[in-house]
Amino acid sequence: MLEVSQIRKEFGGRVVAVDNVSFGADRPQMIGVIGRSGAGKSTLLRMINRLTPATAGEVLVEGRDVLRLKGAEKRAWQRDCAMIFQQFNLVPRLNVVTNVMLGRLNGHGALRSLFSIFGDDDIERALSALDRLGIAGQALQRAETLSGGQQQRVAIARALTQNPRMVLADEPIASLDPLSAEVVMKSLREIHERDGLMVICNLHTLDTARAYCDRVLGMRQGKLVFDGLSSELNPAVVRDIYGADHEINEATTSTSIGPVPRPAEHIGPAAVPA
Ligand SMILES: Nc1ncnc2c1ncn2[C@@H]1O[C@H](COP(=O)(O)OP(=O)(O)OP(=O)(O)O)[C@@H](O)[C@H]1O
Ligand SMILES: [Mg+2]
């Protein structure tokens, strides 16, 4: 169903952010992408979603190269692969249910979108997505008044109302405290299992990839250096992904559930030391 072939991104002809990466999946999987800061994880997802133009390569989805789509077909593809971001990308002053319905705008004509005319089915769909994520009670609150974990669940609900074929999540838990992170990862896992959706998720932490993903892609300096089961992430593989010049242990690459070592609203990933 997905075949990424020799995808490449050069910035300014000098920085090779993604260096001829290939991988495929013949069924919906929950895939984690790990690697140090700057390894190319975000660029990879952004090329698949067409937020960033690829320098070369193909992304075949059911045999069609989505990198070649233009206009309405390109927008349809962007609706088909919903993106979830580290910073949620909600409209802070709009209430939660309106934020979720914005996920449907892509499916409406431009004029209808302009006047924000939502039908009963849009409202119905948004509320049921919120209910599923356990935040229907906050439907009428402004998005900015919610905690980070709740905001990310709103973003997931918005993605679901797009009725996507796959979900791409770029560090969805990097700004969250461990407990919120767990709720968000469980939600993504549930979407994968119950809706049979492919989920590709960039993650900073090894233990999260191990706990929630069946398959892991390891990137180093733009290259795909590991593609295997999460159970195959042994110390040698981990050193290869994160670099042999660093003493890597679970402590520096994990989001332990326990006492929160920093404020819940702390912005910025629990990064592997650069
Ligand atoms: N718009 C851009 N212009 C120039 N270089 C860029 C641009 N975006 C990314 N890069 C470079 O491409 C490389 C890969 O960046 P990318 O953001 O994909 O890494 P990442 O693995 O997502 O890192 P992080 O874990 O910090 O989010 C880095 O060297 C980065 O500096
Ligand atoms: Mg990134």
Image: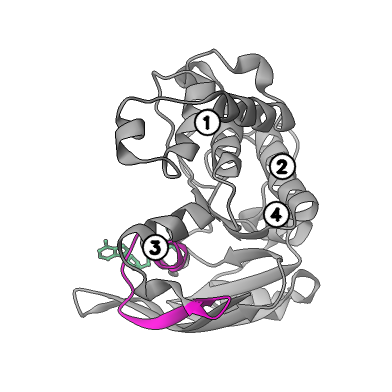
Q: Which mark is residue 187?
A: 2
User: What's the distance in space between the residues labelled 1 and 4, CA to CA?
Assistant: 26 Å
Quadrant where the C terminus sits is: bottom left
Q: Which residues are magenta?
A: 42-64
Q: Considering only order in the chain, which callout, 1 or 2, is on the residue closer to the N terminus?
A: 1
User: What's the distance in space between the residues labelled 2 and 4, CA to CA?
Assistant: 13 Å
Q: Is residue 244 magenta?
A: no
**Mark 1 is on which residue type?**
Val
**Mark 2 is on which residue type?**
Ser
Total of numbered circles in the picture?
A: 4
Nearer the observer, disc 3 or disc 1?
A: 3
Residue 83 visible (yes or no): yes
User: What's the distance in space between the residues labelled 4 and 3, CA to CA?
Assistant: 34 Å
Residue 43 percent across, percent down from the top left: 40, 65
User: Quarter of the image holding residue 26?
Assistant: bottom right
Q: Identify the element where label 3 is drawn.
A: helix
Q: Is residue 54 magenta?
A: yes
Badge 4: residue crowd in 10 Å (few <14, some 14–19, many ≥20)? many
**Which residue has dot 1 on it?**
100
**Which residue has dot 4 on it?**
208
**Which residue has dot 3 on it?**
73
Residue displayed at 48% across by 18% down: 95
